[in-house]
Image (cartoon, rainbow, N blue to C red):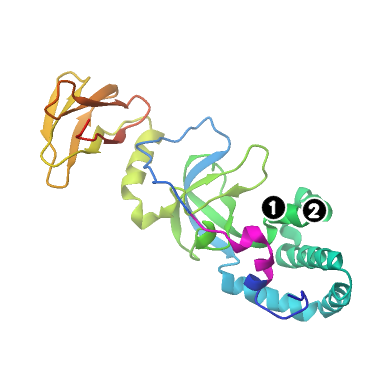
Amino acid sequence: MEIGARVPLCLVLAVLPTHAVLACSCMVSIGFCEKLPDASDPNRAVFVGTVREFYPKSREQMNQIFDDFYRTHQDLISQIRTRTSRPVRGASLGNLEFRKQFIQHLWGDALTPTEREHLGTANERDLDRLMFDYRRRARFDVVENFTGADTAQFELYTNLDGPSCGFDFGDGGTYLIEAYRNPGDEHWRVSSCSRTRTIAAADEELRVLRAWKYGLRVPGRIQGHSGVGIRVRLLGGRQVLETVSDSRGLFEFGNLESGNYEVEVEVGVPVPARRSVDLTHAWCAQVFVPPNR
C-alpha cells in the first residue's frame, strides 16, 4: 500500500502488526471487597471523577483528524510518495516519517519533553510500543479520592477502542476509576479490564471503598459454587456454619469476621473437599469446590 494514498487511519495503521491484531481479553474482574486498594502503592489510583475532556472520543474522530492531517501535509505526502517509488527500505523510512509528523499533529504541545525525545529517536518498532497514535486522553475533575488522586484534576490515557481494551468515557459522565501506571512512567492509564465503571453501576463498590477509606469494615462474606444440593460447612469462625447449595449449585456465608476460614464440601467420601479462604486482607471471597473431590 502506498503511504500517500488517501485512506482511513485504521487502514494506515493496519501496516503495523501490533495494531492490526489487537484484541481485548480480560480475566474475571474481582470486586474491591475481594482486593482492597493498597494506599502504599504510588502507581495505583482509585477515585470518582467527572469527565472534563476526552480526546479523541472515538476511532471516527481519529479518522477525521487524519483527514485534516492529510489535507494540510500534501508536501510531505508527495515527498514520501516519491521516496517509496524507489527502494523498499525507503517505504519504511517514509512510513516512519509520516507517523512521527502525524503524532505531532495529533498531540501537539500535549507531548511531554520526554515523549518528544522518544519520538525523535524512535524507529517503527518503538512507535508500535509507545502507541502515541493509538491512545486517547481523558481529563477529570476529581469528585472523591480514595487513593492516589489527591488533586483537583486527574489526567489519564486509554487505548483507541474496545478491541484494544480501551475504555469509552462520555463527556460529562461520572465514573469510579481504577488507574495504574508503570514505575517511572509519566502517564496514568486505564483499560476496560480494570474495575472502572459508571457511577450508576458502582453502588456496592463505593460502599466498600468508603468503609475502607474511613477505617471501617463491612461484614465479610464467602460465596461459592459446588454441586446442586450439596452440604457445605464453614470452619474457622467462632462456630461451624452449615448450608446447602441451591438449585444452581451456589452457596453463601455472610456476616463473617476477619480471619482464615476453611470451606468444606460433604461429598460422601472419607475426606471432604476443602478450600482455604483468607479474609484478613479482604472482606469477601469467591470459591469453587468441585463436588467430585
Task: Tell me where residue 221 sits by quadrant.
Answer: top left
In the depicted structure, whether residue 232 falls above or below residue 56: above
Residue type at numbered disc 2: Ala
Looking at the image, which residue is at 55% across and 41% down? 150
Q: Is 26 left or right of 248, judged from the image as shown? A: right
Q: Nearer the viewer, residue 151 or 167?
A: 167
Magenta stretch, main secondary structure class:
helix
Question: Where is residue 172 shown, x and y percent of the image?
Answer: 48, 64
Q: Is 169 left or right of 277, judged from the image as shown? A: right
Q: Nearer the viewer, residue 97 or 143?
A: 97
Badge 2, how many Cα within 10 Å: few under 14, some, many 20+? some
Question: Where is residue 266 shown, x and y percent of the image?
Answer: 14, 28
Residue type at numbered disc 1: Leu
If the image is split into quadrants, where does the N terminus sit?
bottom right
Q: Residue tagged by mark 1? A: 130
In the depicted structure, whether residue 55 falls above or below residue 189: below
Q: Is 270 left or right of 167, judged from the image as shown? A: left
Within the magenta stretch, is there residue 277? no
Task: Tell me where residue 43 sits by quadrant.
Answer: top right
Looking at the image, which residue is at 58% across and 58% down? 159
Do the CB atoms of the residues marked 1 and 2 lie less than 8 Å apart? yes
In the depicted structure, whether residue 132 falls above or below residue 293: below
Q: Nearer the viewer, residue 260 or 157?
A: 260
Question: Where is residue 18 shown, x and y percent of the image?
Answer: 64, 57
If the image is split into quadrants, where does the C terminus sit?
top left
Asked which secondary structure carries label 1, the reply is: helix
Looking at the image, which residue is at 62% across and 61% down? 19
Within the magenta stretch, is there residue 15? yes
Labels 1 and 2: the sequence-earlier one:
2
Q: Which residues are magenta?
A: 12-24
In the rendering, which numbered label is found on residue 122?
2
